[in-house]
Amino acid sequence: MTRRADRVFYNGRVFRADAARSWAESIALGAGRILAVGGWSEVAPLIGPDTEVVDLDGRFLGPGFQDAHIHPHTGGRRMLSCDLTDCGDAASALEVIAAYAAAHSEAPWIHGGGWQFSWFDGGMPAATLLDRVVADRPVYLRVADGHAAWANSAALAAAGIDAGHPEPRFGRIERLPDGSPQGTLQEEGGMALVERLLPQESPDDFDAALLAAQRHLFSLGVTAWQDAAVGEQLHHAYRRLADDGRLRATVRGALWWEPEQGREQLDLLVARSGEAVGRYSAGSVKLMLDGVCENFTARTLTPYLDAAGAPTANYGMDYLDPESLPGIVSEVMRRGLQPHFHALGDAAVRRALDAVEVARRDLGWDDLRPHIAHLQIVHPDDLPRFRRLGVIANAQALWACADTAMLDLTVPFIGEPRASWQYPFGALLRAGATLAMGSDWSVTSADPLAQIEVAVRRLVPGDPASVPFLPEQRITVADAFTAFTAGSAYVNHRERESGSLHAGATGDLVILDGDPFVAADLSTLVVEETIVAGETVYRR
């Protein structure tokens, strides 16, 4: 007996996101899965008396977006704290901070984040700015990309940071000419000096942040993701939410590799990887290799330049010892875990590829699908190595434009030819690499449509008059959309059950108010409905 569909959508523009980049007109769902996709003749026989039948009236329907590199806990926590994401400049940020402090007079600390380096001269916000609006208690605010923090004088004093404080490992204290702290703390080592004093999050706090993030992501059509930095408490939060059914999205966790520890942590990570619950699994390991270009901590093959264009002695920062990295990666892969690398600089990207090459040589081929996130600067010699080594290029496309952070804080300090090697999505595809996409939210917007817009046009979001950034690296809408669906599903070993629309796949879908293949600006499109396992989880 033919199974009747629970829901049928017809008369639409249905993009399958399959290898052929093919289209359909209708889709039928039943028991949380796709029963059929094609024309009306394929779905009509599945309609029964209880089937919900929806006329798409020409609207676009595609597979739900899957984010291959994201930090939902950080994003959700920021949404519930002092959130500077939408401020746009330093003056607006100070207004928001002052208002938040006034509304939370009982809070012993003011914490949150979302500011941008480009809002401040030299990219370094000062403690004295914060002191003007909050001087009676500590204030601590992370930059949007998570690689620095802004602290007021009370926070610096509470942490004992003064002119005599030594420089931290894996970080830097920005200082005034007299050696006293300026107010910006760089990277994990610098930020940890203050973060150890922040009020500790409870399990309920973790759960609330993840649920806030899930609601936000559903509103953007995101139905699955790989969490790019899962520590112990976050791992347990995901397991709680998956166990009681509150986690509706499908999540793969990249378990955090602690740089201060060695291979002795592997047994614990392997044990956690076996603690899958419902929609949550944890088969990846996050290996942080470097920082970011804006604060000169991305690891480069040649040194950064100074303001006059002369080479400095700074090549960026190594989070993991380069000599130890191949052994670490080989052992991670030998234990059956997927490496998920953070690498922005060309040296960091090359070291990740070198490490995988050693593992391939020593262990033979496997299907673990290592992937490198960010890929800001990729030496041309390394482009063909992605395909050859089976390494997935995990792109964060929103950064690939000529915005202030690029023009003022990056290009002058990396110089040519490196400035022309940035975010080479087109070159990677031409070299045969598999492309996945993620947002790195809360670093930047979680909106996949905004990410795809920049990947396709390489323009500053919302500024069609801006100059395309390295336009030869533009990719098609089909390739970008597929990277954010099928490509990310492939990263997460879910391509047989999601990422493209085919019979038997999970019924994870997104319906848009316009067609991304003809829209003049994809970032203006709006998600009308998000469906997870056949059920609507968001409707505008």
Image (spheres, rainbow, N blue to C red):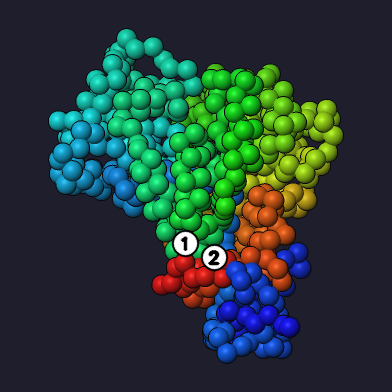
SS at badge 1: helix
Q: Amino acid at mark 2?
A: Val
Left of 404 or right of it: where is 158? left
Left of 57 or right of it: where is 131? left
x%, y% of residue 262?
61, 20
Q: Amino acid at mark 1?
A: Phe
The structure residue drawn at horizontal position 50% and vertical position 50%, both measured from the top left corner, is 243
x%, y% of residue 197?
31, 25
Label 1 or label 2, whichever comes before in sequence order: 1
Residue under label 1, please give it: 218
Q: Is residue 378 visible?
A: no
In the image, residue 459 sits, relative to residue 417, either above or below, namely: below
SS at badge 2: strand
**Residue 14's image quarter?**
bottom right
The structure residue drawn at horizontal position 72% and vertical position 59%, both measured from the top left corner, is 496
Q: Is residue 368 visible?
A: yes
Residue under label 2, please give it: 532
x%, y% of residue 532?
54, 65
